[in-house]
Amino acid sequence: MAKPTKELDILKQHLAKHNLKLTRQRENILTTFLKMEHVTAEQMYRLLAKKDPHIGLATVYRTLKLLCETGLAQEQHFGTQTQFDNVAHKGHHDHLICSTCDKIIEFENCQIEELQEEVARKNGFTIRTHKLELYGNPVLLPNGECKNCGRDLNVQLGRR
Amino acid sequence: MAKPTKELDILKQHLAKHNLKLTRQRENILTTFLKMEHVTAEQMYRLLAKKDPHIGLATVYRTLKLLCETGLAQEQHFGTQTQFDNVAHKGHHDHLICSTCDKIIEFENCQIEELQEEVARKNGFTIRTHKLELYGNPVLLPNGECKNCGRDLNVQLGRR
DNA sequence: TATTCTATTGAGAAAGAGAATCAACTAATG
DNA sequence: CATTAGTTGATTCTCTTTCTCAATAGAATA
């Protein structure tokens, strides 16, 4: 069995292995998916609809889930929204989220990643992926309220 | 102005500051909330309904959100479910989630926490809270499929 | 305490994401 | 090219969360 090298081959192999079929829709979705770092199902649906107005939303959901099963995609929950990450884009980063304005700062920290590996190893696991989000505030008013949103942060800061 | 020391005082102060009113429902919800480490809105609703069958679900949602604004609660998204954490329960822990069986292992790692603080500090932030989730698998079949779920993990493991 | 003003409540409707259903369709196989 | 079994798309359904609005109830004031 020849070793597949491209994503389409990976999909084909997965389909064959599970008695599934390669359809026009599945191929289209994969092609579009590979061009991005991540998408939501809705975004994918709208993108595809431009070329194929008859594509069904259910098919998009089903196929993105399928891509997760092949290992080409990864489902990530971000707040209330679900996105599908393209595993091929290796540029991993974590997030520092401003609770004041919801601005997101991306960062990387190798030491943290190493410690994570260590934790996993101790528990007999191999990390497949991870998610690290830091939520914080930049500036506070003297009374403990966040400058931008007015939220009272005294409690979290242990000021009471 | 006397420094409030209890959660109810914190709530009262917040209500006063924002021209809101202290109601029987708000007091009940706070009382119940303080007994737990975390709840979902549904859970809270069912708990309250035992004593007050006429409580409205919308009120529960509104009040939990209000508690977040006072700083007593914190909204956390876990996969597809939303829970409200009791900030007073300091027992923070992170999660190692088995992608095979969805089992969740809790862990703590001070070194990671310190590095997080450092990242935040460098960016001029104070961490209010954070979320670290490691997703992994314990045992793989020789062909790269997960023993339990049959998912093909070759791609993620860089085997292709 | 009665009055008045405004915030709050609860029931149900509505919105949004996602899964389930099913008849019509189509890829794969011989 | 006929058969078979998986797939699609339209729609319905479910679940969570928010919205709406008339009735209600805090809180401030007289």
Image (cartoon, coloured by chain):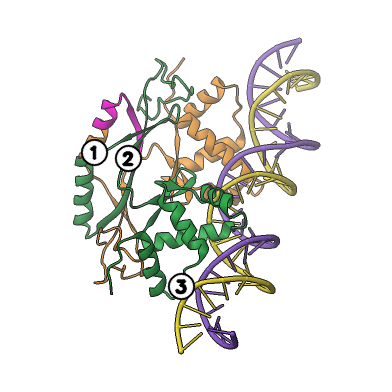
Chain colours: A green, B orange, C yellow, D purple
Judging by the rendered image, the residue that carries numbered circle 2 is A94
Q: Is residue A89 above or below residue A106?
A: below
Q: CA distance from mark 2 to mark 3?
A: 36 Å
Label 1 SS:
loop
> Crowdedness of circle 3 by 10 Å Cα count: few (<14), some, many (20+)?
few
**Which chain is mark 3 on?**
A
Marks 2, 3: nearer the viewer: 3
Judging by the rendered image, the residue that carries numbered circle 3 is A20
Of the 4 image quadrants, the one containing the C terminus of chain B is bottom left
Mark 1 or mark 2, earlier in chain: 2
Q: Position of residue B132 (x, y in %)?
A: 32, 45
Residue type of the residue flagged with mark 3: Leu
Q: Which residues are magenta?
A: B118-133
Q: Position of residue A96 (x, y in %)?
A: 35, 34
> Crowdedness of circle 1 by 10 Å Cα count: few (<14), some, many (20+)?
few
Q: Are marks 2 and 3 in contact (CB under 8 Å)?
A: no
Residue type of the residue flagged with mark 1: Asn
Residue type of the residue flagged with mark 2: Asp
